[in-house]
Image: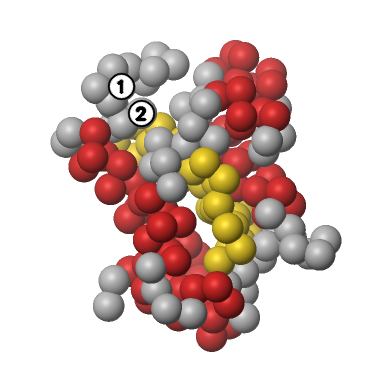
Amino acid sequence: MSASGELVELLIERRLTIAVAESLTGGLLVSDLIATPGASATVLGGVVAYNTELKRSVLGVDASILNVHGAVHPDVAGQMASLVREVLAVDGVPADIGVSTTGVAGPDWQDGREPGTVFIGVAIDSDLRVSAHEFEGDRDAIRRQAADAAVLAVLERLR
C-alpha cells in the first residue's frame, strides 16, 4: 500500500479530516490522497495557490511575510497549513489537520531559493510544525518528492 493510502486509512480509522494547501505540487498531493477508495470520508479538499497573490487572497497568508520573504519560506508553509483548515471548513467545522507545500520545482530560482528547496507545513490543532527539504532532480521529480514528503510528515505526526 502506498504511504498516501496508509495515511487515508489511518485518518478514516481515527475519524480525522484533512485539508491541503499546495503551491509547487499543484494538486499532486490532494490527488494522491483521493486516489484511495473511501478518501471522501476524510479529505475535505485542497487549494492550489500556485500564484503568490492567491496565498494571501484565498488562504490569508500575511502579506508582509510574502512581501519580505516571498512565497518560498517556512512561515508561508506554516500559515498555509494553519489557515487551510479554516478555509476548507465544512459547516463551520475546520479540518483536524492542515498540510501545505511551498517551494521551487525549477528550473529557475524563485525568491532567492534554488530549485529543490521545499517547505512543508503540518498543523494539528494549535501544534504547527514546518520542515525544510532540499530535493534533487528535474521539475517532476522535485514535485513528486515534495508530495511524498508531505504525506510522510503527516503520518509521522500521527504515529
Q: Quadrant of residue 3?
A: bottom left
Of the pair 78 and 93, the residue shown nearer to us: 93
Rendered residue at 43%/64% (across/down): 33
Q: Is residue 47 above or below residue 42?
A: above
Foreground mark, 2 or 1? Answer: 2
Residue at 69% in and 45% down: 83
Q: Position of residue 92 (x, y in %)?
A: 83, 61
Position in image of residue 47 (x %, y %): 57, 45
- Helix, strand or loop under label 2: loop
The answer to whether 20 is drawn above or below residue 73 in the figure is: below
Q: Amino acid at mark 1?
A: Glu
Name the quarter where the N terminus is drawn: bottom left
Name the residue that disc number 2 marks.
104
Q: Is residue 143 above or below residue 88?
A: above
Q: CA distance from mark 2 to mark 1?
A: 7 Å
Q: Secondary structure at mark 1?
A: loop
- Do the numbered discs 2 and 1 sit on residues whose CB atoms are within 8 Å? yes
**Label 2 sits on what residue type?**
Val
Q: Residue furthest left?
A: 137
Count neighbours of disc 2 (C-alpha within 10 A) and say few if under 14, some if 14 to 19, many if 20 or more. Answer: many
Q: Residue beneath label 1, please?
A: 114
